[in-house]
Amino acid sequence: MEDIKRCSWPSNDPLMIEYHDKEWGVPVHDDRKHFEFMLLDAFQAGLNWKIVLHKRENFRRAFEDFDFEKVSQFDEMKIQALLKDEGIIRNRLKVNAAVKNAKAFLSIIKEFGSFDKYIWQFVDYKPIINKWETLSQLPATSRESDLMSKELKKRGFTFVGSTICYAYMQAAGMVNDHLMTCFRYNELSE
């Protein structure tokens, strides 16, 4: 069997392992990918990431391949259809937040040229490299996620509390929270 040292949170779930090994903590600079992670992390609120990850392709289909321009145009009929879609998490507040956040996302792009230019300012345009030895050391929030949450809320976003923002920062590679013993830590610290 493989003898790779990785963070323990993916457990033995193949999809979680693939996500950990190829995506988690890799710096994102594509606006559609930013929107995907923001949307998925909002739907994760109060739930386990594994649940969301296993529904990711259903979310991709339901939310037009995470096209924020199309999602911003979703009307009540589309929202009702999504609330009947068993492939996603059917929570009216979260579905409404996805549409509202898509509109706020577009406003930021209009103002800054890209969402990427706006969001990376919270970490001074470079990933924060942490030095954790155990999963219990990983924080749920940070000074940066607190500020990001506050600013996103001012701009009309919902489901962007500091914990959700921190999970998003981890996913989008704005913070490297791989354990120092994980093979991805050094790869993403360079």
Image (tube, rainbow, N blue to C red):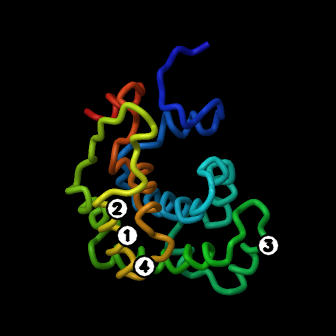
Picture coordinates of residue 27, whole percent (x, y): 35, 47
User: Which of marks 1 and 3 precedes in the sequence?
Assistant: 3
User: How many residues crowd around disc 3 within 10 Å: few (fewer than 14), some, or many (20 or more)?
Assistant: few
Answer left or right for 117 relative to 5: left
Identity, as a three-letter code, of the amino acid under mark 2: Ser
Answer left or right for 164 relative to 143: right
Identity, as a three-letter code, of the amino acid under mark 1: Ser
Report the Cα–Cα distance between label 2 and label 3. 33 Å
Q: Is residue 112 above or below residue 27?
A: below
Residue behind mark 2: 145
Picture coordinates of residue 44, whole percent (x, y): 58, 59
Identity, as a three-letter code, of the amino acid under mark 3: Lys
Q: Tell me the tag on residue 149.
A: 1
Answer left or right for 140 relative to 188: right
- Residue mark closest to the camera, 2 vs 4: 2
User: Which of marks 3 and 2 precedes in the sequence?
Assistant: 3
Identity, as a three-letter code, of the amino acid under mark 4: Ala
Report the Cα–Cα distance between label 1 and label 4. 13 Å
Name the residue located 41 percent from the left edge and 49 percent from the top edge: 170
Name the residue located 35 percent from the left edge and 42 percent from the top edge: 176
Please report contact status of discs 2 and 1: CB closer than 8 Å, yes or no: yes
Q: Residue furthest bottom?
A: 76
User: Which of marks 4 and 2 precedes in the sequence?
Assistant: 4
Name the residue located 27 percent from the left edge and 47 percent from the top edge: 127
Residue behind mark 3: 84
User: Which of marks 4 and 3 precedes in the sequence?
Assistant: 3
Label 3 residue SS: loop
Report the Cα–Cα distance between label 3 and label 1. 30 Å
Q: Tell me the tag on residue 64.
A: none
Residue behind mark 4: 104
Report the Cα–Cα distance between label 2 and label 4. 18 Å
